[in-house]
């Protein structure tokens, strides 16, 4: 276990209940359909039941659940047991259709060449060895398999004055509009402490990811830096205006 991994696991164990509520809202509203459209627009044109999809860092299960509902063969992994418990609850009748595994994203316990697609959301930025994770994700993909990773420059404001100003402006806008603040609703001190120590917080992404994925042997590495406009709710757009979500796509 890495130096930070236990601490990160503890943080997400404590966050599981609150984060699960966020996923439940996404599953209850229009967002699940938006996300599924974005994913399926990139997926191979096979029938869903023919595609094996691995959801890495599933958290409370959002990707795993929407993909299982759409008929895909889904395996979902997370390092935090409490998150997997919430994910099973959130999946309801679909829980039995999803293969759940407690696993480190940086050291997957699957044989090589197992999956047609790997998906992940808001995970890579928390990892101690994101470059190693990308190598592992490539390893478990079949030849020609697809990686779709959604993330953002989370907590870059801890290292950049201009980003700090934009982040504080986001907090003021959230307050002015009387919306729920997605940052202050968490244990912000602990998260910032972790963010200061993981390697990707000060890095400019997705440029970093493109370079690392190419050096890991991925082909056809592309990014979509406007994907947040298609998938985020209005509340998310206001909360995270200074940290827009990007999509990185790559093929083994």
Image (cartoon, rainbow, N blue to C red):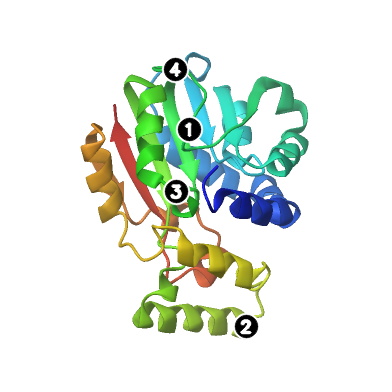
Residue 126 pos. (x, y %): 49, 53
Q: Residues within 10 Å of mark 1 (few under 14, many from 20)?
A: few
Tell me which corner region of the image, top left, top right, bottom left or bottom right, holds residue 246.
bottom left
| Identity of the residue drawn at 69% across and 43% down | 83
Residue 92 pos. (x, y %): 77, 32
Quadrant in the picture for the C terminus: top left
Nearer the observer: mark 1 or 2; the answer is 1
Report the residue marked by disc 4. 114
| Identity of the residue drawn at 50% across and 78% down | 170
Can you say whether 240 is above or below 80 in the image? Answer: below
Can you say whether 150 is above or below 117 in the image? Answer: below
Nearer the observer: mark 1 or 4; the answer is 1
The Cα–Cα distance between marks 1 and 4, rounded to whole angstroms, is 15 Å
Residue 163 pos. (x, y %): 38, 77
Nearer the observer: mark 2 or 3; the answer is 3
Report the residue marked by disc 2. 175
Report the residue marked by disc 3. 124
Among numbered discs 2 and 3, the one appearing first in the sequence: 3
Q: Nearer the viewer, residue 37 or 115?
A: 115
| Identity of the residue drawn at 68% across and 69% down | 185
For label 4, the SS is loop
Report the residue marked by disc 1. 107
The Cα–Cα distance between marks 1 and 3, rounded to whole angstroms, is 13 Å
For label 2, the SS is helix
Image position of 239 (left or right of 17): left
Among numbered discs 2 and 4, the one appearing first in the sequence: 4
- Asked if one can make out residue 22 in the rendered structure from this viewpoint, the answer is no
Image position of 184 (left or right of 249): right
Nearer the observer: mark 2 or 4; the answer is 4
Q: Residues within 10 Å of mark 3 (few under 14, many from 20)?
A: many
């Amino acid at each position: 276990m890495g130096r930070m991994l236990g601490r990160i696991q503890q943080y997400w164990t404590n966050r599981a209940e609150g984060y699960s509520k966020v996923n439940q809202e996404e599953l209850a509203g229009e967002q699940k359909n938006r996300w599924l459209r974005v994913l399926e627009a990139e997926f191979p044109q096979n029938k869903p039941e023919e595609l094996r999809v691995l959801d890495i860092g599933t958290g409370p299960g959002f990707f795993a659940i929407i993909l299982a509902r759409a008929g895909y063969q889904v395996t979902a992994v997370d390092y935090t047991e409490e998150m997997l418990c919430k994910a099973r609850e959130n999946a309801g009748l679909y829980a039995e259709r999803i293969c759940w595994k407690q696993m480190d994203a940086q050291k997957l316990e699957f044989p090589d060449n197992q999956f047609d697609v790997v998906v992940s959301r808001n995970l890579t930025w928390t990892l101690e060895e994101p470059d190693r994770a990308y190598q592992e994700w490539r390893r478990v993909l079949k030849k020609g398999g697809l990686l779709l990773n959604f993330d953002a420059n989370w907590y870059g404001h801890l290292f950049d004055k201009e980003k700090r100003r934009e982040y504080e402006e986001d907090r003021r806008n959230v307050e002015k509009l009387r919306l729920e603040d997605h940052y202050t609703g968490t244990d912000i001190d602990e998260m910032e402490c972790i963010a200061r120590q993981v390697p990707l917080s000060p890095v400019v992404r997705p440029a970093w990811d493109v370079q690392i994925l190419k050096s890991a042997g991925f082909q056809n590495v592309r990014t979509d830096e406007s994907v947040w406009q298609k998938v985020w709710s209005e509340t998310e757009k206001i909360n995270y205006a200074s940290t827009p979500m990007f999509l990185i796509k790559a093929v083994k």
